Image (cartoon, rainbow, N blue to C red):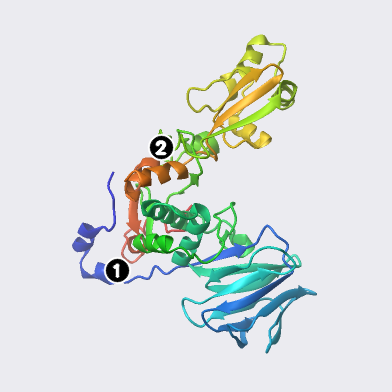
Amino acid sequence: MVLLRTLLPLFLLLGSTVWAQQDITVDRTMRIGLYRERVVKQVVVMPVKSICVLFADGERKGEVATTDGLRISVAGGAITARSLTLNVTAKRKIELVPRVTDGGFRLRISDTKLPERTYPGKLAVTVTAGNLMLVNAVPLEAYTAGVVQAEAGKEHHQEYYKLQAVTCRTYALTNQRKHQPEGFELCDGVHCQVYHGRNRNDSIRMAVDATHSLVLVDADIKLIQATFHSNCGGETVNAEDLWGRSQTYLRATVDTFCTAAPHATWTKNMSRTEWLGYLQRKYSLRTGDSAQLYAVLNYEPQCRDLYLGNTWPLVPLKNVREDLGLKSTFFSVRTEGEKVVLEGRGFGHGVGLCQEGAMKMARAGKSYTDILHHYYTSVHLVDLTTLDFFRDDSLAPNGGAGGPRSR
């Protein structure tokens, strides 16, 4: 596999016009919906690092000092914002904008025990269905660092932080239309990527800086769906096996690194009556058919399957996982008297990068690029400035290969 950092030979052929394009900024801003799983009526916001300018419906209303706090609430469809020196009402939007580029804000949801969080960038507050909608406009690299901190945690190898930075950055750009109808691009929960604000880990900051602007693309120079999960149980899954749509870079691969990790195995016990009753109700299992009964009570897959027992009627394992709240679709079934034991492997959907496998690979001395190529087939690592060049209609004869927003 070829690792592409820049397309230097082609740049040289195209001449000096190309080098001018090297100055294209990659300082994108992401709009992240905060606390979307909660009903928010009131928040307290305090500037961090610098004074923030307060705007109401686009009009500058004043400044909020780092020693002051702003209480924002919704009443009668309008938004009110009060501090020690300000009392502002807006019909549509309240915005808090730091005066310095590395500024931000602290945010606390009133009347809850949720801890305060600190965010980089700007805050926009609007009203949706009578509740406050909070949107953090944050630079891409700062957002990436925050996601890596939330998704990866602390005390990992630097190479692991680097690969997680690349996948999180790529995923964000590939999916930045996910919540567009709602007024933002991505949410801060597991539906998109977990994001709890500003990164405070120096190792993560260094990893994000070391991979600045690097993303994964496929053979057509299109950003990939850089999916990842906790543990694959020793074998990842083809994208079409789970989601019905094939992707050339999301192919099944063997992973011997994750099989002894914390989330490598799991067990669920059910009564025989409960297990067979579920299969009978949902899939019309014929309990009088001894061959069929044996297949669903004594199931031992040698590798990942798509269907339970591979018997008729077909029982999709992905549906069983969803219905019973299982950690993965990779499991065996055995009976102990009147008890049915499901013994599983892995945690998550199993497509793409296995986080616990990647962690061990990094500790074993593998580079982040080698690890990425293990989990994503025939991909290239490129700088966003390279993508910008090929997306520029004035330089690309056919208008480029589709921008970072391409799905």
| Residue underneath mark 1 | 22
The reply to whether dot 1 and dot 2 touch (C-beta < 8 Å) is no
Instruction: Answer yes or no: is residue 376 visible.
Output: no
Q: Residue at x 52, y 67 (%)?
A: 198
The percent position of residue 257, horizontal first and vertical second, equals: 41, 37
Asked which secondary structure carries label 2, the reply is loop
Residue 214 location, quadrant: bottom left
Instruction: Answer yes or no: is residue 146 visible.
Output: yes
* 338 left or right of 372 in image: right
Please tell me which residue lies in front, 309 or 12: 309
Please tell me which residue lies in front, 149 or 254: 149
- Check the image and name the residue furthest to the front: 155
Q: CA distance from mark 1 to mark 2?
A: 39 Å
Asked which secondary structure carries label 1, the reply is loop
Q: Residue at x 44, y 65 (%)?
A: 141
* 226 left or right of 309 in image: left
Amino acid of disc 1: Gln
**Which part of the image, by quadrant, shows the N terminus?**
top left
Residue 215 location, quadrant: bottom left
Looking at the picture, does residue 392 appear above or below residue 288?
below
Please tell me which residue lies in front, 28 or 202: 202
Q: Earlier in the sequence, mark 1 or mark 2?
A: 1
| Residue underneath mark 2 | 257
